[in-house]
């Protein structure tokens, strides 16, 4: 069954909880700046001047993206890009060794290869997708069935071989107003599927419960996907039109740890490429000696509390969320969520 409305989506996955939405702020605070200083790599989601959804790996060295007075983010692109500055862009920042990622959404301006993003939203994403994918661990070589697609851009043999073994992808999407978002998805290698019509299927698993990608694609279906494979300096970039399904046959093929996903995204691929990435290579994402020790990073419970306080949501419910937030409560909630809702 295809889901075509927000109401139908929320009947399957539930509505977005207020405390989760309130973790987003409209500036780069001290925690964001600290994380940016340690991040050597990000995925940039943008629309090009032809209107195509794109996802690019950017970075190469820690601190490549600089906060400008907390309101803007600036960095140099690996090469000049035809970015449509009328449409929002999004960034998903990785800190090697850390499960949580930093998501920054805003409006781009371009000066040659120098990209400046006016920050509209910044928040931490939970670690579940990275934990499920074992993204920072040494890859274990296993024999997995190779994906097969009947025709079209996705039928490229090298692309399919890479996707057959990837444990981690990012999804870049936009809402009806053009605001962008890039979200992580991860599972053990082999989690991607191809349906009978040649569409790439990505299972939905428990995460931060914002479901931004799904809300966005119901408003406009263009989506870009970037796939990473531990130990590999190449990436696969796909783009096309996405939809949501609760088809039981497809979902039953996606069982992990005896858990069946409630829905899956289907991407009708219009563009596909497998390319080497200088950003992945230079960031040395899988060099464990370059991973950031947890002791050098802020505690996620503290980040959550501070961001709840900085969030500008008004009303009694928002005030109650702030009043109840404490290290003990937030820490316990995070621990319980990771233990009970990893899949």
Image (tube, grey):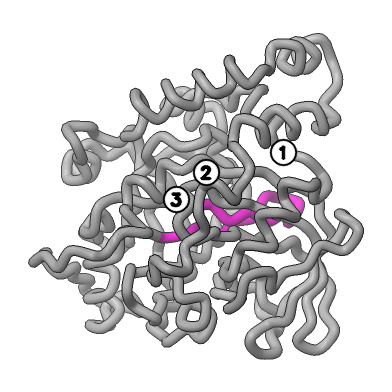
What residue is disc 1 on? Answer: 24
51 horizontally vs 55: left or right: right
Q: Position of residue 338 (x, y in %)?
A: 40, 30
Give the vertical position of 262 relative to 79 (above or below). above
Residue at x-position 52% and y-position 65%: 224
Is residue 165 rendered magenta in the image? no
Q: Are marks 3 and 1 in contact (CB under 8 Å)?
A: no
Quick one: label 3, few (<14), some, or many (20+) residues within 10 Å? many
The residue carrying pointer 2 sits among few (fewer than 14), some (14 to 19) or many (20 or more) residues within 10 Å by Cα, namely many
- Distance (Cα) linking label 1 and label 2: 18 Å
Helix, strand or loop at label 3? It is strand
Residue that numbered label 3 is attached to: 243
> Residue 264 location in percent, x, y?
35, 44
The percent position of residue 260, horizontal first and vertical second, equals: 24, 34
Q: Are marks 2 and 3 in contact (CB under 8 Å)?
A: no
- Residue at the location (58% across, 16% down)? 328
* Left or right, residue 21 beside residue 256: right
Crowding at mark 1 (Cα within 10 Å: few <14, some 14-19, many 20+): many
**Does residue 97 sit above or below 323 in this rendering?**
below
Along the viewing direction, whichever of 115 and 302 lies nearer the viewer: 302
Up the image or down, 158 lies above or below 266; here it is below
Residue 120 or residue 155, whichever sits in front: 120
User: Which residue, given by chain and number where applicable, does mark 2 sit on?
Assistant: 214
Q: Quadrant of residue 244?
A: top left
Magenta span: predominant SS is strand
Measure the alpha-carbon separation of dots 3 and 1.
Answer: 26 Å
Helix, strand or loop at label 2? It is helix
Considering only order in the chain, which callout, 2 or 1, is on the residue closer to the N terminus? 1
Q: Which residues fall within the magenta stretch?
A: 169-183
Q: Is any atom of residue 155 visible in this view?
A: yes
- How far apart marks 2 and 3 lie (CA) works out to 8 Å
At x 17%, y 32%, the residue is 258
């Amino acid at each position: 069954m295809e889901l075509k409305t927000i109401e139908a989506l929320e009947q399957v996955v539930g509505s977005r909880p207020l405390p989760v939405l309130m973790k987003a702020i409209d500036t780069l605070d001290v925690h964001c700046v600290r994380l940016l200083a340690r991040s050597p790599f990000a995925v940039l989601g943008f629309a090009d001047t032809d209107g195509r959804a794109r996802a690019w790996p950017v970075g190469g060295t820690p601190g490549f993206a600089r906060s400008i007075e907390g309101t803007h983010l600036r960095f140099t692109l690996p090469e000049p890009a035809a970015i449509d500055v009328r449409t929002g862009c999004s960034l998903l920042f990785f800190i090697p060794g850390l499960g949580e990622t930093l998501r920054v959404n805003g409006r781009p301006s371009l000066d040659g290869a120098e990209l400046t993003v006016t920050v509209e939203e910044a928040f931490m994403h939970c670690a579940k997708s990275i934990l499920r994918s074992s993204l920072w661990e040494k890859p274990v070589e296993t024999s997995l069935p190779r994906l097969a697609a009947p025709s079209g851009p996705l039928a490229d043999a090298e692309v399919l071989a890479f996707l057959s073994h990837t444990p981690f992808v990012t999804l870049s999407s936009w809402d009806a107003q053009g605001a962008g978002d890039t979200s992580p998805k991860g599972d053990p290698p082999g989690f991607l599927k191809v349906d009978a019509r040649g569409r790439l299927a990505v299972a939905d698993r428990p995460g931060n419960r914002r479901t931004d990608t799904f809300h966005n694609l119901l408003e406009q279906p263009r989506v870009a996907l970037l796939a990473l494979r531990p130990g590999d300096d190449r990436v696969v970039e796909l783009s096309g039109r996405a939809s949501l399904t609760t088809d039981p046959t497809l979902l039953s093929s996606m069982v992990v740890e005896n858990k069946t996903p409630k829905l899956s995204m289907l991407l009708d691929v219009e563009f596909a490429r497998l390319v080497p990435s200088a950003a992945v290579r230079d960031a040395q994402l899988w060099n464990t000696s370059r991973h950031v020790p947890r002791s050098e990073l802020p505690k996620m419970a503290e980040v959550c509390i501070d961001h709840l306080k900085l969030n500008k949501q008004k009303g009694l419910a928002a005030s109650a969320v702030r009043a109840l937030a404490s290290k003990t409560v937030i820490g316990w909630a995070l621990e319980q969520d990771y233990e009970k809702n990893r899949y």
